[in-house]
Image (tube, rainbow, N blue to C red):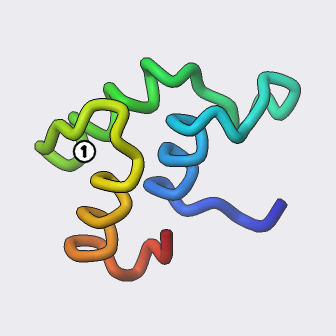
């Protein structure tokens, strides 16, 4: 897997697309959501598409 940017990594974890065997990148969905809320000041719950839209608008360098 290529280098993950912070938001991209959190979104992949939120979607359950990184399994626990990849210990360096893995976070439980709940922890990924907690960090997304903390870093962004937003709360879209588990709505990955809403998070992606926010990241594309506010963090375009993240390329999600």
Q: Compared with residue 50, is residue 55 higher up or lower down, i.e. above or below? A: below
Query: Which residue occupies 21% across, 72% down?
Result: 58
Q: Quadrant of the N terminus?
A: bottom right
Q: Is residue 9 above or below residue 28?
A: below
Residue at x 12% of width, y 43% of height: 41
Looking at the picture, tell me which residue is in the foreground, 2 or 19: 19
- Residue under the point 29% across and 66% down: 53
As drawn, 5 above or below 59: above
Mark 1 residue crowding within 10 angstroms, few (<14) / some (14–19) / many (20+): few
Q: Nearer the viewer, residue 39 or 15?
A: 15
Residue at left offset 78%, top offset 23%: 20
Count of marks placed on residues: 1
- Residue 51: x %, y % from top left: 32, 53
Side (left or right) of 48 relative to 29: left
Say which residue label 1 marks: 39
**For residue 56, what is the image quadrant?**
bottom left
**Image coords of residue 35 (percent x, y):** 34, 33
């Amino acid at each position: 897997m290529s280098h993950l940017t912070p938001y991209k990594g959190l979104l992949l974890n939120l979607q359950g697309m990184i399994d626990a065997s990849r210990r360096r990148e893995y976070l439980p969905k709940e922890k990924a959501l907690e960090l997304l809320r903390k870093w962004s000041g937003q709360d879209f719950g588990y709505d990955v598409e809403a998070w992606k839209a926010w990241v594309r608008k506010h963090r375009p360098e993240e390329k999600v």
